Image (tube, grey):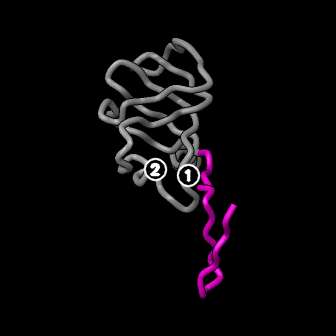
Amino acid sequence: MVTQFDEKGKFFTDIIQKEPVWVTVQLADSRIHGLIHIRSEARIKEELDDPTPFLAVTQADVYSSDGTTRLFTTRFIAINKAQISWITSDHDTFNKEAEK
């Protein structure tokens, strides 16, 4: 592993640091709850803007489109980004509900 430092002390390595984020993803025929892994200090939007056509979701629960019936659970699912209607961080959703 190669580590380089710039003049401000920020370090650069060949390893990409990512953090897991719990999300809910709405597709036309299903809703998925699971973890996506985004670069440290990045937003979900940057992950969606990446030219890779698929979004990897781990520890995924796949529900019916209205979110009421769990269809199956899987350790990994790749979602075609073009099929996403909306996506939200579950952390943001729960914080809004707690404020009420």
Point 59% across, 47% down: residue: 98
Location of residue 85 by image quarter? top left
Pick the front one: 69 or 62: 62
> Relative to residue 53, is residue 14 depicted above or below?
below
User: Residue 15 at what x, y percent from top left?
Assistant: 63, 56
Q: Secondary structure at mark 2?
A: helix
Query: Nearer the N terminus, badge 2 or badge 1?
Result: 2
> Which amino acid is tagged 1?
Glu
Report the magenta residues as a range.
1-20
| Disc ID at residue 44 | 2
Point 56% across, 13% down: residue: 72
> Relative to residue 54, is residue 1 depicted above or below?
below
Pick the front one: 89 or 74: 74
Q: Which residue is mark 1?
A: 99
Is 13 a magenta residue? yes
> Relative to residue 17, is residue 78 depicted above or below?
above
User: Residue 8 at what x, y percent from top left?
Assistant: 61, 86
User: Residue 95 at what x, y percent from top left?
Assistant: 56, 49
| Disc ID at residue 59 | none
> Relative to residue 59, is residue 38 depicted above or below?
below
Q: Answer yes or no: do the residues labelled 2 and 1 have beta carbons within 8 Å?
A: no
Pick the front one: 39 or 91: 39
Tell me: 93 left or right of 29. Answer: right
Neighbor class of circle 1 (other Cα within 10 Å; few <14, some 14-19, many 20+) is few
Neighbor class of circle 2 (other Cα within 10 Å; few <14, some 14-19, many 20+) is some
Location of residue 73 by image quarter? top right
User: Residue 62 at what x, y percent from top left?
Assistant: 51, 20
